[in-house]
Image (tube, rainbow, N blue to C red):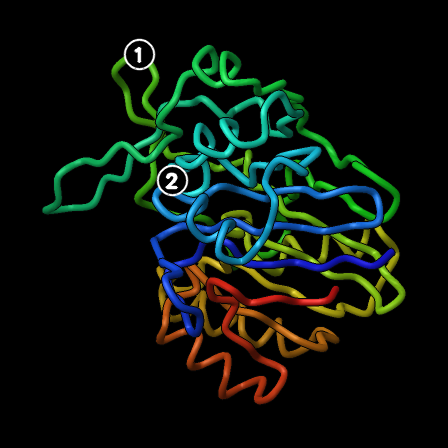
Amino acid sequence: MKVTATVLVENSVLVGRDLVGEHGWAVFLETEGGNFLLDTGQGNAIINNARLLRKDLSSVKGIILSHHHYDHTGGLIQALEHIGPVDVYAHPDLFKKSYLRRKGEEEQYIGIPFTQEELEEKGARFRFDKGWQELIPGLYITGEVPRTTSFETGPADMFCKENDAYIKDSLLDDQSLALVTEQGLSVILGCAHAGIINTLQYCMEKTGCRQVNIVMGGTHLGPQDQATKEQSIQALKELTIKRIGGSHCTGLPTSARLATEFGERFFFASVGTVVQL
């Protein structure tokens, strides 16, 4: 299967007139089985960038949401207005109420900014699932990723609110896309809250592919403590990865570090980046 991935939303824009960046993530996927959209950013960039990059949102046959955070789901209303009725693949925890709570800072709501009813009125046909699933031959959604490494413990500052009590958000809804092509396994991350190594190992286990062609997306290495970051980078170096594209929550300092470690195999997956998977 041949797949072309075009980054529509990301924190930065490297080239391209009138394209805009925002803290978020969205990728347009063109496949032999139809076009798909992974995430939608915050909502200020997706329509503008899709138009300028000549990606027809009305051609999308399915929207995949990597997790519930606003910077991945905030553009869902705008996307639906252009796409019309469409299947939306998501984890059942999509509408949980979650917050960012950091010492000395005001609490922030970081969940999806819409209700299920609002989105269904715009044409969303939700397909909730926790497990690994194949959308079309060679294209998979991971569902919940097993947490097997000792060092990827997840964010300590994200919480869910239940009955006025705050509970640490384990982010079980974090999921990624796995694609099996002639070049091997490619993985497109959302934020990799489950851990980039956990995610890659799970995708290799489920597909049977040991060669990782491309991994791209938010690695969530940027906010990690130094020890976790170092262990994750070392584990990445031990895998057979042809190319790695850092973006979004990878952060610029960590992206620079990955560029140093991986050399020409590293690229910035910014708005307008086109990758043949």
Q: Residue at x 50, y 18 (%)?
A: 122
From the viewer's side, name the closer residue of 138 and 198. Answer: 138
Q: Is residue 182 left or right of residue 274?
A: right
Reading the image, the residue beneath label 1 is 163
Q: Residue at x 48, y 19 (%)?
A: 119
**Residue at mark 1 to residue at mark 2: CA–CA distance:** 30 Å
Q: Secondary structure at mark 1?
A: loop
**Image quadrant for the C terminus?**
bottom right
Question: The residue under label 2 is which amino acid type?
Answer: Gly
Image height check: is 231 above or below 21? below
Quadrant location of the N terminus in the rendered image? bottom right
Around disc 1, counting alpha carbons within 10 Å, would you say few (fewer than 14), some (14 to 19), or many (20 or more)?
few
In the rendered image of this protein, does residue 196 appear above or below residue 78? below
User: Which callout, 1 or 2, points at the residue further toward the start of the chain?
Assistant: 2
Identified by mark 1, the residue type is Asn
Instruction: Please tell me which residue lies in front, 227 or 116.
Output: 116
Tell me if 116 is positioned left or right of 58 in this view: left
Quarter of the image where one finds residue 73: top left
Q: Nearer the viewer, mark 1 or mark 2?
A: 2
Q: Quadrant of residue 107?
A: top left
Please state if 264 lies on the left or on the right of 268 as rendered: right
Q: Residue at x 51, y 37 (%)?
A: 67
**Location of residue 189 in the rendering, given as x and y in whole percent from the top left corner:** 58, 53
Q: Which residue is mark 2?
A: 43
Give coordinates of residue 5: x percent, y percent.
65, 58
